[in-house]
Image (cartoon, coloured by chain):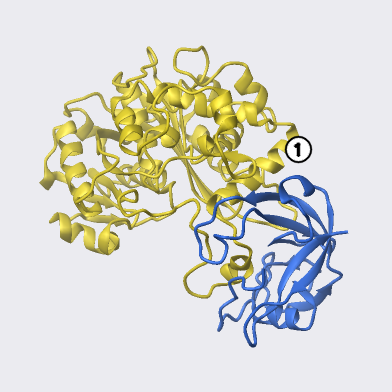
Chain colours: A blue, B yellow
């Protein structure tokens, strides 16, 4: 599918993350003490400090948990059939919601602990942000 | 530690209909308040405190007192989803003990069924831009799939099975079949089978979001109700036995890097509530736990301290839950799974606790003295709140 809901802007916390997706980069933040901050924000969730650094993840992670959605009444997902939503633990120490692509049957081909790699799924529409999704490796 | 008697629930009302076309949420709130005051033997003009979860047409809250026509000296519009009413009880205990009000009311009204609101499967992430929506909306996560992710992780870490989780639905339905309002609810909402169910029935019902089946998910109904909180002085002269609020705890939890999704906010709110009450989980007769889904109850049984983390499957297999079995009794009104779920079920946890401690439940546990009501608001696998309230009969 290539017409997922898009992020909405202006939204200052996540804008830089999404600009990264255009560059093929999965970006995350660290504070001055090295704590990982994710989802993106303007402050450290440990200290409140606003002095954050942007980094680029290698995009490798592990499936922490997942579900296969069989019923979603939201337009765009309604006719998709079964698809996965998952929390992915990236090797750099952050957890993000995403989906898992490249499996023929999501109900049997996905498991907790599975290693996955990010890829950026192009979306319909001019100027649309590519969406980071994960594929088993 | 001696239990302090600082505030009581004096009157309750549960709106009887689960399908109520032509009635507004605000009308359900006002009607329920009147009937709850009648239940206590108190008058409309006695109300000097108002708690509200911002439900109802027009958003309640700021406009609710105007709609009702009362002038309370305390207003609290805490909105934390389905746990709002446990937070209201917690705040009423605090506020009444501080002398800020003497007769306070919380009301709830919803026409979610008549309005065809797809609470569990409607998809999330609509509305304006926000940091969280921008990160999650593209993936089509539904409310149910969020809870299902907790179930998958719980099964992975502890070997919990669908058969074990299904027992929660089975016990709850057993109670529902004894509650005429729940039976009417299931009939009016056109349940395929308005009868007791088996583990096989649960497993054979369709999967909504793996690993959760239809019969592990709460219904969507209309409904509402009210509870009246009073000071000990008022409690002396009410019509029925007061039910004392002896402890309360509040907490929140959310997706964290490296966090444990199988532990909820209840692990923080419950020790606070039990500590204030001076009682332990093994003394509790009745557990009214927010059963949005089977997994919600399973996680809360652990987090409330009825068994250790990861051991709920065995706890369930040991034969607890039903009112006619020894040990802890769960959700005797039929729960959200089989009696009503208009969106924020927390109020009904308080109402059935009161019925049990008065001896008025349709699945009465003889001699019930202590109940815990635990509400969960928001997303168990994401941002949520937990409100725990310990209630005691004299």
On the image, the x and y values in percent for residue B179 come to: 32, 24
Locate residue A66 relative to residue B297 in the image: left or right: right
Give the residue drawn at x 75%, y 58%.
Answer: A88
Locate residue B167 relative to residue B87 in the image: left or right: right
Q: Nearer the viewer, residue B237 or B200?
A: B200
Q: Could one spot residue B153 in this view of the protein?
A: yes
Q: Residue furthest bottom?
A: A126
Q: Could one spot residue A31 in this view of the protein?
A: no
Q: Which residue is mark 1?
A: B157
On the image, the x and y values in percent for residue B114 come to: 30, 50
Picture quadrant where residue A13 is located: bottom right
On the image, the x and y values in percent for residue B47 come to: 18, 47
On the image, the x and y values in percent for residue B250 come to: 49, 46
Locate residue A99 relative to residue B172 in the image: left or right: right
Locate residue B85 relative to residue B42 in the image: left or right: right
Protein chain holding label 1: B
């Amino acid at each position: 599918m290539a017409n997922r809901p898009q992020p909405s802007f202006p939204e200052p916390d996540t804008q830089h993350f999404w600009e990264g997706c255009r560059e093929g980069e999965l970006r995350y933040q660290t504070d001055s003490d090295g704590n990982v901050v994710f989802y993106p924000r303007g402050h450290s969730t440990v200290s409140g400090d606003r002095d954050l650094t942007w980094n680029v993840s290698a995009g490798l992670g592990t499936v922490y948990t997942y579900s296969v959605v069989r019923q979603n009444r939201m337009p765009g997902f309604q006719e998709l059939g079964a698809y996965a939503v998952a929390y992915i633990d990236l090797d750099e120490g952050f957890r993000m919601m995403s989906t898992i692509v490249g499996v023929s049957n999501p109900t049997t081909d996905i498991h907790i602990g599975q290693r996955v790699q990010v890829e950026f799924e192009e979306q319909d529409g001019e100027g649309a942000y590519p969406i980071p999704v994960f594929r088993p490796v | 530690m001696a239990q302090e008697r600082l505030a009581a629930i004096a009157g309750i009302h549960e709106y009887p209909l689960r399908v109520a076309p032509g009635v507004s949420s605000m009308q359900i709130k006002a009607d329920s308040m009147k009937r709850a005051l009648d239940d206590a033997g108190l008058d409309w003009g006695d109300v000097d405190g108002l708690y509200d979860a911002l439900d109802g047409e027009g958003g309640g809250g700021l406009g609710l007192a105007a709609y009702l026509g009362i002038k309370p000296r305390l207003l609290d519009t805490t909105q934390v989803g389905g746990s709002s009413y446990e937070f209201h009880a917690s705040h009423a205990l605090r506020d009444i003990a501080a002398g800020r009000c003497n007769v306070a009311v919380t009301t709830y009204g919803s026409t979610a069924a008549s309005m065809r609101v797809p609470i569990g499967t409607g998809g999330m992430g609509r509305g304006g831009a926000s940091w969280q929506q921008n990160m999650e909306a593209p993936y089509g996560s539904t409310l149910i799939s969020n809870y299902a992710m907790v179930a998958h992780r719980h099964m992975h870490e502890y070997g919990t099975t669908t058969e074990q989780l299904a027992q929660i639905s089975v016990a709850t339905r057993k109670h529902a079949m004894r509650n005429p309002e729940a039976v009417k609810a299931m009939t009016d909402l056109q349940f395929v089978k308005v009868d007791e169910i088996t583990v096989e029935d649960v497993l054979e019902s369709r999967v909504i979001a793996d690993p959760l089946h239809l019969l592990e998910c709460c219904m969507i109904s209309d409904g509402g109700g009210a509870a009246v909180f009073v000071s000990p002085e008022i409690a002396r002269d009410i019509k029925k036995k007061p039910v004392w609020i002896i402890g309360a705890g509040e907490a929140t939890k959310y997706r964290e890097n490296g966090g444990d999704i199988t532990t909820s906010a209840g692990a923080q709110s419950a020790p606070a509530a039990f500590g204030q009450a001076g009682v332990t989980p093994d003394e509790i007769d009745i557990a009214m736990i927010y059963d949005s889904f089977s997994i919600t109850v399973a996680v809360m049984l652990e987090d409330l301290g009825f068994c250790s983390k990861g051991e709920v499957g065995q706890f369930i297999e040991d034969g607890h839950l039903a009112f006619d079995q020894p040990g802890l009794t769960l959700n005797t009104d039929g729960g959200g799974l089989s009696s009503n779920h208009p969106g924020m079920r927390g109020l009904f946890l308080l109402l059935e606790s009161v019925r049990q401690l008065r001896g008025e439940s349709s699945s009465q546990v003889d001699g019930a003295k202590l109940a815990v009501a635990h509400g969960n608001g928001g997303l168990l696998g994401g941002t949520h709140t937990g409100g725990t309230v310990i209630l005691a009969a004299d």
